[in-house]
Amino acid sequence: MTYCCGVLVEDGLVMVADTRTNAGLDNISTYRKLHVFNRPGDRIMAIASAGNLSISQSVLSTLTEGLEDPETGARETLLDAPTMFQAAQRIGRVIRHVNATEAQALKAEDINYEVSFLFGGQIKGERMRLFMIYPAGNFIECTIDTPYLQIGEHKYGKPVLDRAITYDVELYEALKTSLISMDSTMRSNLGVGLPIDVLVARVDVCDADLNHRIEAGEPYFHDLRSRWSAALRAAHKNIPRPPYKDQK
């Protein structure tokens, strides 16, 4: 299991992903799930993955090396995509290509081969965008009305984003809320865990403002977790008891 979220606000983009993968209670490993494709000043793109690890790694490797266009013979990569929309289309094509090659064998072994991706960033000259790409290769785009997308174990962190994220939230406030969302998920699901990879990119910079890994024991994240827990306990305590039965 995994949890990844992307938040697109007026100031820029935040993407957060955990690194835990497991195949049973006694087989837990750490793998990077947030990958950055960057040509400073020209483009910044990030992909977060959830689902079958071997399929997601095959998709990422193909996007790096390029998938041959059957009409032109050219190899298409993310870094030469002319627009973010066409880059999202390329990811979808690669997912279908990898599934056509590998999915049948995995299905025969009763292995879940589905993957999904968050894909966000900006190419110079166009607006910053954020997409969620489904296992079939189709995708949806983030909107101003709901300026975040999630993949993986999303239900525990969603209420935090629903209550706190709007399009006009300051960029690093959006990061703080995303980390609280991640902490809420980690509290409720052992399949999501540290380290956490973080990317922050400002609009029209086409480079990473922050590309950071939060390790276990990092002071800020530890403090954030403690403060959030204390704030929830205090809020609960300050809400009056339900008046539905006479209190004795």
Image: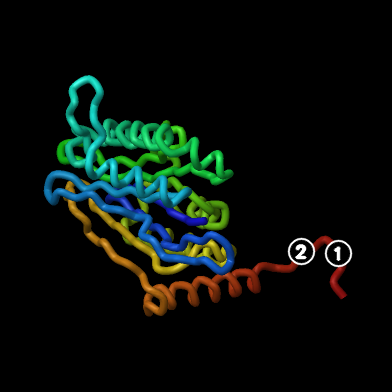
Q: Is residue 230 above or below residue 16?
A: below
Mark 1, residues whose alpha carbon is within 10 Å: few (<14), some, or many (≥20)?
few
In this rendered view, identify the residue nearer to me: 219 or 204: 219
Residue 235: percent from left, percent from top: 59, 70
In this rendered view, identify the residue nearer to me: 20 or 107: 107
Element at label 2? loop
Q: Tell me if 144 is positioned left or right of 23 in this view.
A: left
Q: Is residue 112 above or below residue 73?
A: below
- The amino acid type of the residue labelled 1 equals Lys
Q: Are marks 1 and 2 in contact (CB under 8 Å)?
A: yes
Residue 188: percent from left, percent from top: 59, 64
Which residue is denoted by mark 1 in the rendering?
A: 245
The residue lying furthest to the left in this view is 41
Which residue is denoted by mark 2 in the rendering?
A: 242
Which quarter of the image is occupied by the C terminus? bottom right
Q: Residue at x 56, y 57 (%)?
A: 156
**Disc 1 to disc 2, C-alpha distance:** 8 Å
- The amino acid type of the residue labelled 2 equals Pro
Q: Is residue 73 above or below residue 166?
A: above
- Quarter of the figure with residue 122: top left
Element at label 1? loop
Q: Residue at x 55, y 39 (%)?
A: 108
Mark 2, residues whose alpha carbon is within 10 Å: few (<14), some, or many (≥20)?
few
Residue 228: percent from left, percent from top: 50, 71
Residue 55: percent from left, percent from top: 41, 45
In this rendered view, identify the residue nearer to me: 33 or 170: 33
In this rendered view, identify the residue nearer to me: 188 or 64: 64
Q: Residue at x 58, y 66 (%)?
A: 25
